[in-house]
Image (tube, helix red, strand yellow):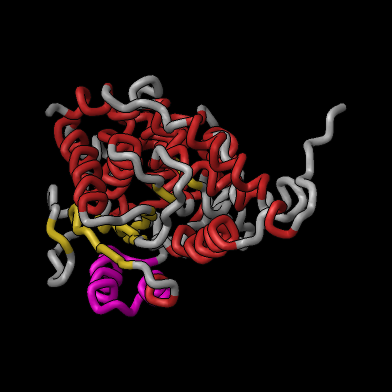
Amino acid sequence: MELMERIAGIAPADQAAYAACQAQLNQIAKPLGSLGKLETLLCRVAAASGTAQIDVGKKCVLVFCADNGVVAQGVAQSGSEVTGAIARSLAAGTTSVSVMAQACGADVYPVDMGMLQPVPGVMDCRLGSGTGDISLGAAMSRQTAQQAVWTGMELVRKRVEEGYRVIATGEAGIGNTTTSSAVASVLLRQPVERVTGRGSGLSDAGLVHKQQIIARALEVNRPDPQDPLDVLAKVGGFDLAAMTGAFLGGAAFHVPVVIDGLISSVAALCAVRMCPAAGTYLLASHVSAEPAGKLLMEELGLSAPLHADMRLGEGTGAVALFPLLDLAAAVYHRAARFEQIQVEAYTPWEN
């Protein structure tokens, strides 16, 4: 099946299941809506999976690893060799996201979408040895961008077949806050300066230089804001495109997918621009400390439950949501109902 044909077959999440989940939440012996955003999360899980029988037991995070040619322009504090170092740590299970996932019983799948060098123990989905330098030309061809999106969708399909019920997204790739900011600037139609932050820790001068490089990339490539695939191909990255596919895959295969930080939020927006129905399968985790973080959440129409000023990447913010999902699901399944404690249920206020 061709990519666009698969995307065209995506339907919005099941709003009847959403309503049924909310009705069950309202029968729990507690004030209506008192679990706040946790209730919204559970309802979105129900809608995505098509049933009010909530199951968030088996969870994983897909960590997309890729290198970006624009690093040659000095837009990051680290060099591209650090991407490989992070990938080796992912394979060994010692990165921050790996340890966090272990602590909450989730699995980590590092995926090589196109690092400079392959790393043993990392899933091989390579599309090249890094993208092109976006300040000089396109990051990749449109065909390669399509392949990256398809790969992300397929990875989700396989995880769903293995029984995973919630999938988080993460990334590792020096320079990807530059590519993400470029894509965000185009899709949000915002000035580069408003959506570009310091990444892993640039100085004031480094931030100005990064913004200038992104502005140059947009001038050189002239990505079409009406065509998300064109934007990804011209100023995105292998990781961004594959993560876009992961969000589309969640919608295609009826599983909620958790957004992480800046890079993940940009990919989520790409997915929604390609297929608006995909937005109903998204779960927000936290608001990135990067400048575009809040803007992206607002554009996606989501409200994140975590406000921790996180900006680590790797999927750490997305995995931080897992324990909250478990806690909310425990209340949903095991807490007393009004009828069990012989108390009349609350009724909504009417103005």
Residue at position x 52%, y 48% from top?
A: 284
Residue at position x 18%, y 54% from top?
A: 114
The quarter holding residue 316 reads bottom left
Quadrant of the frame with the N terminus:
top left
Relative to the observer, which residue lies in front, 51 or 289? 51
Quick check: is 326 in the magenta stretch? no
Quadrant of the frame with the C terminus:
top right
Residue at position x 48%, y 53% from top?
A: 261
Residue 236 at least partly seen? no
Image location of residue 157, percent across then percent down: 22, 45
169, above or below 223, in the image: below
In the picture, measured across the screen, residue 79 lies left or right of residue 45, that is left
Image location of residue 161, percent across then percent down: 21, 50
Q: Which residues are magenta?
A: 78-100
Q: Total number of numbered labels? A: 0
5, above or below 18, in the image: above
Which residue is farthest right?
A: 351
Relative to the observer, which residue lies in front, 258 or 287? 258
Image location of residue 238, percent across then percent down: 24, 46
In the picture, measured across the screen, residue 8 lies left or right of residue 167, that is left
Per the picture, the main secondary structure of the magenta-coloured stretch is: helix
Residue at position x 41%, y 65% from top?
A: 77
Residue 90 at least partly seen? yes
Image location of residue 328, percent across then percent down: 57, 58
93, above or below 114, in the image: below
56, above or below 235, in the image: below
